[in-house]
Image (cartoon, grey):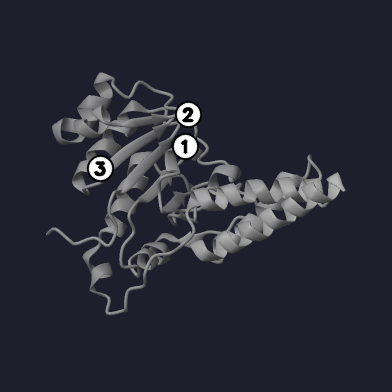
Amino acid sequence: MILEKNFSNLKIILVEPNGPLNVGSVARLCSNFEVEELRIVSPKCDINSLETKKMALKKGQKFIDHCKIYQNLENAIFDCDLVIASCGRIDVSKDSFFESSEDIFSWILTFKKIKNLAIIFGREDRGLTNNELLLANKTFNIPTSKNNPSLNLSHAVSIVLYELNKPSRRNSTVELEVFDLASSKQIHDSFVEIEEMLMKVGYLLKHTSRAKISKFKNYILRANTSMQEINVLRGIVNQINWFLNNSKRN
């Protein structure tokens, strides 16, 4: 059964995958669930190997042939309106905030239209770093046994794509909202400016700035900040920077 989606251009992003079998399996899944594009950040394996092709099969091969390769995660997500990250690690920062995959996917379906949705999956052995997790609007993990919490990469992708496409999620009678969240790029650029300004006024020190600014950024992400709200914040920061630069001349 083909379901009408409230999002288009779904992008699956793999960060530094080191298993060609996993890459091939994910490509096949992209075909199963009508993913628009597969993107890979700094692959640690040959994504065009025979192993990859065997797992991708014919219908998944097009995702390998047209796969976009990026040097860093920032470049891979900056044309996306909404970025969701999967995390299976148990040693994440104590300031990190996770939601259940069920809650996040149900939340996604409350919007009328999302132009570009990206879902990020980390390295097979160590997942995403704390800084990479902060590039996402929301972060989730898939509940598993505490004795063996780490899922195989392709298995995690299959669960996520299935959950996102469950028919039961699309029978809601909730009135859909217009999507106007600040994008990952807008939030990232804002915090580059904020960090520079706070270092300039002496509130942040170079060796501790990243940890402190991460707490503030987590707050903004959890608040589901809109494009208008982030623009107001950037306007305030730009005005303060203008004042600081001009006061030095006088």
Mark 2 to mark 3 CA distance (whole Å):
22 Å
**Number of other residues with Cα within 10 Å of mark 1, as a class: few under 14, some 14 to 19, many 20 or more:** few
Residue at 31% from the left image edge and 38% from the top image edge: 38
Residue at 44% from the left image edge and 57% from the top image edge: 143
Q: Pointer 2 and pointer 1: residues touching (CB < 8 Å)?
A: yes
Q: Nearer the viewer, residue 93 or 172?
A: 172
Which residue is disc 2 drawn over?
A: 71
Residue 75, numbered label: 1
Check disc 2 and report its element: helix, strand or loop: loop
Under mark 1, the amino acid is Asn
The location of residue 229, given as percent across then percent down, is 56, 65
Residue at 36% from the left image edge and 72% from the top image edge: 177
- Asked if residue 68 lies left or right of residue 243, the reply is left
Under mark 2, the amino acid is Gln
Under mark 3, the amino acid is Cys
Which residue is disc 3 drawn over?
A: 30
